[in-house]
Image (cartoon, helix red, strand yellow):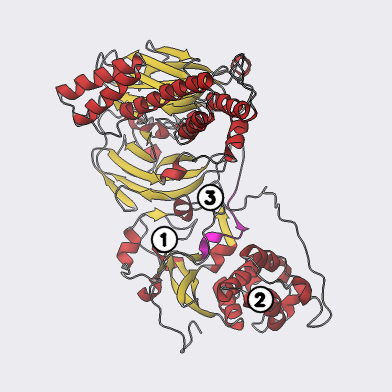
Amino acid sequence: MKTLRHYPKPAPNIKGKKLETPVQWFGDWTPVWPNAVQNLAKQKPSKFQDNDSGLEDVANIGLSIHDIEFRARHTPRYFNESFDDLIEYLVMGIDTSANPEMLIVRALVGWLSSQKLNTFKHLTGTEDTPEGCLALLAQRRTTFSTVFTIICRKADITCVQVGGMCKALGRYQPGHTNMTDLACLWNAIYIEKQWYIIHPIWMCKAFVGAKSNGWFKIVEKSQVLTNFNKYAFTEYYVMTDPEEFKYTCFPFDPQWQLQKTPISRQEFLEQPFLLPPFFGLGLELKSKHSCVLDVNNGKTLIEVEAKARNSNLLHLWYELSFGNNIALLNESDREFVEPQVLPRHVRMVRFANKWNFDIHLPVEGVYKFAIFAGPNQNPLVRVCEFLLKCLTRKPSCLPLRIDPGFIGFGPNISSERVGLVIPLKRRGEIYVKKDDVFNAKFLIDGNIADKIEVKATFYPSGFAGSRTEKVSCELNRKQREVSVTTTVPKDGEYILTMWTASNFEQRKRQGYQPVCHYLLTSYISPVQESPRQRHQRRKLQVAMEAEDMNGMEGAIQQCIKEGIDPEDDELQYTKLKCQILKARKDIHDCILRKNLDITLQTLKFIRQSKLTKVLCQEIVTLVKLKEGQDYGQVGSDWEETESEYSLQYSLNSLQGWKTN
């Protein structure tokens, strides 16, 4: 039976989140790829001869979730002969914990998700034993949800089977309204006096592949990765937050949404198609909440925001595809929707923890737009999809001259990784007009300031050929700053690209690599400023160029007084420049005065600023100075520490200090 008469009535989960401590934000949302290496050692407990021997070997007071799941995933097969033996083994030692019901569920989940069903295909299917249930599952005569219901009730866990429809990974397409072939079963469990959602088949199997509409791994063009179902424990579907679960599954009985305000079937079909990694990465959709976007005049905007603490670790990317038959288009239209051209109709603009996907559609028709994301040096996976219905094309819709790829426009993790750590211009798309002077600056990581090579290119977008404009790139290694300056020759759209090489040898061997693009355009609305604001901004720029700390501080106050946003890029960059000048002045005083208290205060000031990477050599200087002051070894001939000391060494030295 799907439910039992004596079960509590479904009610919203007032806690909202899972009972246990949440996993790392990117810890388990990526499915197991075919070439994944399992690092978990396979430890098997010895078989026992009776109910007492052997069980004592695995009993452990104060078992953690990791202990419970490890034991469950490596359950010897002979325990599958009896529900009593299996449950007794899985729950051993759990009854002494603070949340025994939750740990029992984790044990059951760990056992079910680790079973290799092919080994049970030849057995007789029956619901009387665990292996009989697994045989039914292997023979496709039952469902994961039914097996999970049976084993939960055997373990005295209240479990209900919920029926509904789902936006199944690999089968659903944004805009689909006929969901009759997407019926689905999942479960709700009642533990710790709360109802929680569990989706057994999705917690046990992840759909992956180069062409799937769910999980997506980016592969090289020369590689072939076909669609397949891969067994993989997926943490997300164990006690899923109902507020997130509503984007993929809709129960026929609305009360099993476990929300105070259930959504309707129509709302479920119309809401955006957001996949689990979208929530696992802490992303939020800021633009229209719909899976189908009607596009007038060929332009639409999709905005995604990440949590501030995660944004500097993320890569985002996109895929735009044309849904109509290209062969039916005339030749002049066809060239604008070719697969190699379509990505260049999207401007992925980064600003701090926000990504704007500015999409320009050159031909009427239906398009599909997908966004991919992932932590640095991890596979990018599909996180959301949209259907775009272009009713009228954008006039004179020229593609970008280049495809910036996951670098996009604006400072990002790629520029930070090579040492360009603090930008003057944080926004990737900037308004310019004819004869404007554009200046982009970056502070450089102090550990590589003596080695990095930087150059810049500036060219019009949308023009064929290799035409470029004049651009100046100056690298001040002493001040650890790179400055790029160019003059806009006329109104239009331009791309400024910064290229780096880590040293002279890399430049000779591999050449420069692009790390940051800026899109300069006169086709967007400018920020309106009063004459007094523009005057104060010019005074700020003069003071910053002269490195006049007092002048910069005064100019910042005047800019704020005139109504310029305190979070303005130039104001924020100038504040950091002031902090650098102050830190270097204080370090000079420390060397002259040899005062331990002043040295510790200066270290504390630098550590609490955003300049740790820029001032890493200064940190090493203070570390050595402090050590000398502790032992009375600092003399008049003491010299500043050279740069061979790494930032990691200096930070490790600082961690043990206790300063007031």
Q: Nearer the viewer, mark 1 or mark 3?
A: 3
The secondary structure type at the circle numbered 3 is loop
Q: Quadrant of the rendered structure where residue 398 is? A: top left
Pick the residue in front: 1 or 242. 242
Give the numbered dot on residue 26: 3
Callout 1 secondary element = helix
- Tell me which label, 3 or 2, sits earlier in the chain: 3
**What segment carries the magenta color?**
225-238
Kind of element beneath mark 2: loop
Which one is in front in this view, the residue at disc 2 or the one at disc 1?
A: 2
Rounded to the nearest angstrom, the CA distance separating label 1 from label 3 is 16 Å
Residue drawn at the location 45% of the way across and 74% of the way down: 195
**336 or 103: nearer the viewer:** 103
Which of 120 and 325 lies nearest the eye of the viewer?
Answer: 120
Ranked by sequence position, the earlier of labels 2 and 1 is 2
Image x and y of residue 54, in percent: 80, 75
Q: Position of residue 409 (x, y in %)?
A: 40, 30
| Residue 147 visible, this angle | yes
Provide the residue designation for mark 1: 244
Q: In the picture provided, is 3 more to the left or to the right than 294?
A: right
In the picture as drawn, the residue positioned furthest to the bottom comes out as 5
Q: Earlier in the sequence, mark 1 or mark 3?
A: 3
Marks 3,2: beta carbons within 8 A: no
Q: Tell me, yes or no, whether the highlighted magenta stretch contains residue 228.
A: yes
Instruction: Specify the amino acid type for callout 1.
Output: Glu
